[in-house]
């Protein structure tokens, strides 16, 4: 099943902002990040490595825990090993 980018408007302390998330079938993870590019790259990685929906919550946790200086790119992802190791591990 394909992972897709989603977006929405959210409110925090009286301020409205646009944030991005992902969905896979009926599973939705909203308001992950305001950085569209980073979430798009996460979606691409999930689809490229055919990550199962059971692993999405843990992958998002890893994504959110990554240091701010880590750049998520499609070609070179310094922390991609976190995702690849987790995605390859047996359930």
Image (spheres, helix red, strand yellow):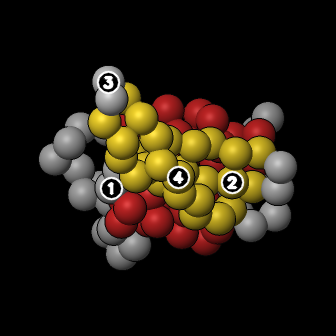
Residue 13: image tag: 3
Local SS, label 3: loop
Disc 4 or 3, which lies upstream in sequence? 4
Tell me which residue sits at (82%, 56%) in the image. Answer: 25
Query: Nearer the viewer's eye, disc 4 or disc 3?
Result: 3
Q: Which residue is mark 2?
A: 23
Disc 2 or 3, which lies upstream in sequence? 3
Disc 4 or 1, which lies upstream in sequence? 4
Across and down, in percent, residue 89 comes to 68, 41
Q: Is residue 63 visible?
A: no
Judged from this view, the residue extending furthest toward the bottom is 75
Q: CA distance from mark 2 to mark 4?
A: 12 Å
Query: Nearer the viewer's eye, disc 2 or disc 3?
Result: 3
Q: CA distance from mark 2 to mark 1?
A: 16 Å
Tell me which residue sits at (63%, 35%) in the image. Answer: 57
Q: Which residue is mark 1?
A: 35
Estimate how packed mark 3 is, as few (under 14), some (14 to 19) or many (20 or more) residues with alpha carbons within 10 Å: few
Q: CA distance from mark 2 to mark 3?
A: 26 Å
Residue 8: image tag: 4
Disc 2 or 1, which lies upstream in sequence? 2
Local SS, label 2: strand
Above/below status of 22 relative to 65: below
Judged from this view, the residue extending furthest toward the front is 14
Choose top left, top right, bottom left or bottom right for residue 50.
bottom right
Query: Nearer the viewer's eye, disc 2 or disc 4?
Result: 4
Front in this rendered view, residue 90 or 24: 24
Local SS, label 1: loop
């Amino acid at each position: 099943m394909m992972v897709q980018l989603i977006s929405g408007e959210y409110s925090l302390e009286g301020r409205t902002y646009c944030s991005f998330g992902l969905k896979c079938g009926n599973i939705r993870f909203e308001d992950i990040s305001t950085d569209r590019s980073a979430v798009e790259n996460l979606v691409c990685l999930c689809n490229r490595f055919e990550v199962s929906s059971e692993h999405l919550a843990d992958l998002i946790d890893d994504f959110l825990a990554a240091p701010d200086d880590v750049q998520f790119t499609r070609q070179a992802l310094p922390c991609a090993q976190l995702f690849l190791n987790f995605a390859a591990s047996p359930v």
